[in-house]
């Protein structure tokens, strides 16, 4: 019987352990987590979501304060079209986050950055160009284009000196999305170095509608693989979403996947950015405690724990400080939803907003508990301690469990003081 370790991913002239830890914004997939994946010979992701606030928290910069100061006059205004990112600050924050991470890299693996197109930041093209270029400048090994079709993203960096040597890939959820991407970029004569195929059981935003349950990762992977074969294209395919055990991963590898991308299992790693009390919520969750809802202002369905503090919370929009989801006209679905509730309840000190959430604020504060479908199985990956809590795992333990386990087994961590 085979295990993941019987396979290798050939990328960037290396032979890697074919395990990719997916990007989890906002600093849930921390530098520490990504660096562990690289040290162990696989690929880890940091995320560029809200990187100025991540930089403030990590490196004591003042990007958020400075932006809020510049636009303070607009806080009570419902029109946010004025609120712009300082592109110099954005580049600096990205270079800090990426540069410091890459300085710490050890081992034979790689560190990539997850870059979401849906973070439109009131100037989609300009801000995305800066984010991508600055990450390349700072030495990132590769970029995974996420959350969007990215039809113009390659061309934003085609003149960058690293455009042809950095590993550039894209996440898609359908063959059609991949075909569109390839067609749009044909003129650049540069194929993606890898394609992550993310199915409907993943965490974060889904590339499906509310009918997500009608789709199935294995079927989409087969469709894409067959099509690439017919086209004579040799691009490594990396399935993602609901791959919970080493055996799940091995099954994809045996069918020709180049690697697997996983995330949910690592939400309970000590290197993960989620606060310890939130990690216990992930452990405790049952299947009935997880939902896919439409409260993300991006318009994409998102999976999360039903007890996420973000759900229903009616805080005033924080676009002057954050504003990552403002479209090119300075609009965000949450602003509208919030204003509607305020108009309905003019006397209320605080309103409840069920329709949308202020995703910037809540992701920043770890109050939107997005998670994969199989989060309810996390409790089976650890031990219950005598204080009733679950034991937090090391990223190394989880990584090795994916790499070496067979027969659907999940290795439990070394006993601390677990309940018998
Ligand atoms: C907590 C959490 C946050 C996530 N955030 C992002 C994100 O910011 N960008 C992205 O492209 N994917 C995001 N994802 C998706 C993962 O990168 C990954 O592809 C997917 O969750 C893999 O499926 P699994 O969680 O079932 O292993 C997130 C997943 C989780 C669990």
Image (spheres, grey):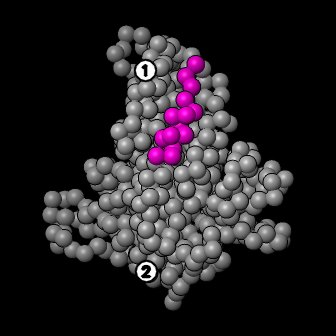
Q: Residue at x 82, y 72 (%)?
A: 232
For the image shown, how many numbered marks are present on the structure?
Answer: 2
Q: Percent x, y for residue 287?
A: 41, 56
Q: Residue at x 57, y 78 (%)?
A: 15
Above or below: residue 340 compared with residue 271: above
Q: Is residue 188 magenta?
A: no
Whether ligand 1 has any atom under 8 Å from the Cβ at mark 1 is answered as no
Q: Which mark is residue 405?
A: 2
Residue that badge 1 annotates: 69
Whether 160 is drawn above or below 127: the answer is below
Kindly state the secondary structure of the residue where label 1 is placed. Answer: helix
Segment tinted magenta in the rendering: 82-96
Quarter-wise, where is residue 182 in the image?
A: bottom right
Q: Is residue 329 above or below residue 152?
A: above
Residue in front for this viewpoint, 110 or 251: 110
Q: Residues within 10 Å of mark 2 (few under 14, many from 20)?
A: many
Residue 134, percent from left and from top = 58, 46
Residue 80 pos. (x, y %): 56, 20
Q: Point out the image quarter for the C terminus.
A: bottom left
Q: Nearer the viewer, residue 91 or 386?
A: 91
């Amino acid at each position: 019987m085979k295990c993941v370790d019987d396979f290798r991913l050939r990328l960037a002239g290396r032979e890697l352990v074919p395990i990719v830890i997916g990007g989890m914004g906002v600093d849930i997939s921390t530098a520490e987590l990504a660096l562990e994946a690289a040290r162990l010979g696989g690929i880890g992701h940091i995320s560029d979501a809200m990187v100025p606030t991540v930089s403030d928290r990590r490196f004591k910069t003042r990007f958020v304060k400075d932006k809020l100061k510049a636009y303070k006059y607009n806080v009570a205004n419902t029109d946010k079209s004025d609120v712009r990112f300082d592109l110099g600050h954005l580049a600096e924050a990205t270079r800090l986050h990426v540069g410091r991470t890459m300085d710490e890299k050890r081992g034979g693996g790689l560190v990539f950055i997850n870059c979401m197109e849906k973070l439109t930041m009131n100037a989609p093209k300009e801000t995305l160009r800066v984010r991508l270029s600055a990450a390349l400048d700072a030495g990132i090994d590769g970029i995974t284009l996420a959350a969007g079709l990215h039809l113009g993203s390659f061309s934003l960096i085609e003149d960058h000196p690293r455009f042809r040597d950095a590993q550039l890939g894209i996440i898609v959820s359908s063959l059609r999305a991949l075909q569109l991407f390839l067609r749009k970029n044909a003129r650049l004569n540069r194929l993606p170095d890898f394609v992550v195929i993310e199915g409907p059981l993943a965490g974060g935003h889904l590339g499906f509608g509310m009918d997500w349950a009608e789709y199935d990762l294995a079927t989409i992977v087969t469709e894409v693989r067959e099509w690439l074969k017919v086209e004579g294209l040799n691009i490594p395919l990396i399935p993602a979403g609901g791959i919970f055990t080493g055996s799940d991963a091995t099954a994809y590898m045996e069918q020709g996947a180049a690697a697997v991308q996983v995330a949910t299992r690592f939400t309970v790693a000590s290197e993960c950015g989620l606060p310890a009390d939130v990690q216990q919520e992930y452990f405790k969750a049952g299947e009935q405690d997880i939902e896919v809802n439409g409260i993300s202002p991006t318009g994409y369905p998102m999976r999360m724990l039903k007890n996420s503090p973000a759900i229903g919370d009616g805080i005033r929009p924080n676009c002057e400080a954050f504003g990552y989801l403002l479209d090119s006209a300075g609009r965000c679905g949450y602003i509208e939803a919030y204003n509607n509730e305020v108009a309905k309840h003019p006397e209320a000190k605080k309103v409840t907003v069920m329709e949308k959430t202020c995703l910037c604020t809540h992701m920043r504060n770890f109050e939107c508990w997005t998670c994969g479908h199989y989060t309810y199985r996390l409790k089976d990956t650890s031990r219950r301690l005598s204080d009733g809590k679950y034991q937090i795992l090391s990223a190394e333990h989880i990584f090795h469990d994916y790499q070496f386990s067979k027969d659907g087994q999940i290795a439990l961590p070394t006993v601390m003081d677990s309940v018998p």
